[in-house]
Image: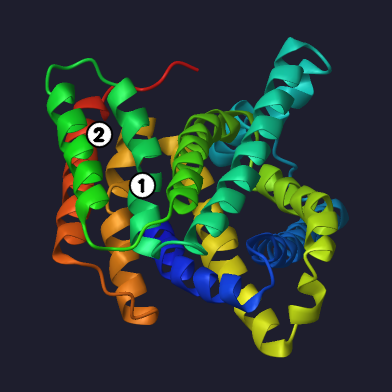
Amino acid sequence: MMVSLLSMQVGNSFAQKLTQAMTTPIGAVWVRMAFSGVILLAMAGVRWLARRVMHSTVARDPATPLRSAQDDGVGGRAQVDGVGESSAAGVGEHSWKAWGFAIAYGAALLTMNSMFYEAIARIPVGIVITIEFLGPLTVAILGSRHVQDFIWVALAGLGVVILGITPTHLTLAGVLFSLAAAVCWASYILLGWRVARHWHGVGVLTGTCVSATVLLMPLFLLGGNQHALTPPTLWLGLLVAVTCTVLPYSLELMALKRLPAGLFAIIESLAPAIGALAAWWILHQNLHFGDWIAIACVVAASVGASLTAARKPLPS
């Protein structure tokens, strides 16, 4: 989770550079998803080839017994938590439920990224991440039923109010896009927690990136973004794909299988501060003192709310 967090927040600053290089923000989303899809498909191909080689080796050596999933602790768990469970269910209720979670997860991920890129094209990255983080904060608070939750809500509300009165230039569209991204981020956490228990590996993430590349192609072309595909832009898109999608989301899917949503949110609580620091370092985006106070309020509220919910796992 820590590697995922650092990769994502540093990558977000490069994502704004990519957004500025493209004709429209959706163009930047498309480049990111296209590269991510290619990388994830290549990784899937390597895994498939490795399994074929191992199977052939075992088949040629009769002295090597074939182990079932139940004989392998890790493999057995993967069958319980992953694709094996859906496959065993056939086209029954559980299978459709698993597919529903996967499709909803993909839609939340695609919409979250689209809203985020629209937002960072209008207001500073650190502010966008802070507003967007109200989504995970809501997840943490809803996962708990303690009196202290009112304190965390008030502290987060104070942070939002401070953001509204600081001299930093904010646009209404940028704030609204950030709030939309917050809703999608909350959905991503809740859905990802369930997807990680129904599907094994990063297959859902791969399918999401490939589907997003196809679905966003018309918007990409209508925006004239194809003219912005220069070698520097492509290299930047590759960097953003690795740091913002392939590495962090792959790690998060593994983390969500092992962590309650509340504990997941505790680690994510550092995101606004790290994102703002990365934007200051990479993009030279200087925030006012009040902005940093607002970020501190939201981070403190998230940590506090998550601590009260960390030991209460969500129902499956």
Q: Look at 68% across and 59% down and name the residue there.
A: 26
- Taking the image as shown, residue 46 lies to the left or right of residue 274, namely right
In the image shown, does 143 or 203 lie closer to the viewer?
143
The mark found on residue 131 in the picture is 1
The mark found on residue 311 in the picture is none
Q: Give, as a three-letter code, the residue at label 2.
A: Ser
Quickly name the residue at label 2.
306
Above or below — where is 285 with respect to 123? below
For disc 1, the neighbor class at 10 Å (few under 14, some 14 to 19, many from 20) is: many
Q: Give, as a three-letter code, the residue at label 1.
A: Ile
Above or below — where is 53 with respect to 159? below
What separation in Å lies between label 1 and label 2 (alpha carbons)? 17 Å
For disc 2, the neighbor class at 10 Å (few under 14, some 14 to 19, many from 20) is: many
Disc 2 secondary structure class? helix
- Can you give x and y, in whole percent of width and height, for residue 285 in the image? 33, 75
Q: Look at 30% across and 47% down and name the residue there.
A: 267
- Taking the image as shown, residue 147 lies to the left or right of residue 179, namely left
Disc 1 secondary structure class? helix
- Can you give x and y, in whole percent of width and height, for residue 273 in the image? 26, 59
In the image shown, does 129 or 64 lie closer to the viewer?
129
- Can you give x and y, in whole percent of width and height, for residue 309 in the image? 25, 26
Asked whether the viewer can see residue 80, the reply is yes
- Can you give x and y, in whole percent of width and height, for residue 208 in the image? 71, 46
Q: Look at 75% across and 57% down and name the residue there.
A: 44
Above or below — where is 283 with respect to 270? below
Scheme of colours in the image: rainbow
Q: Residue 289 falls in which quadrant of the image?
A: bottom left
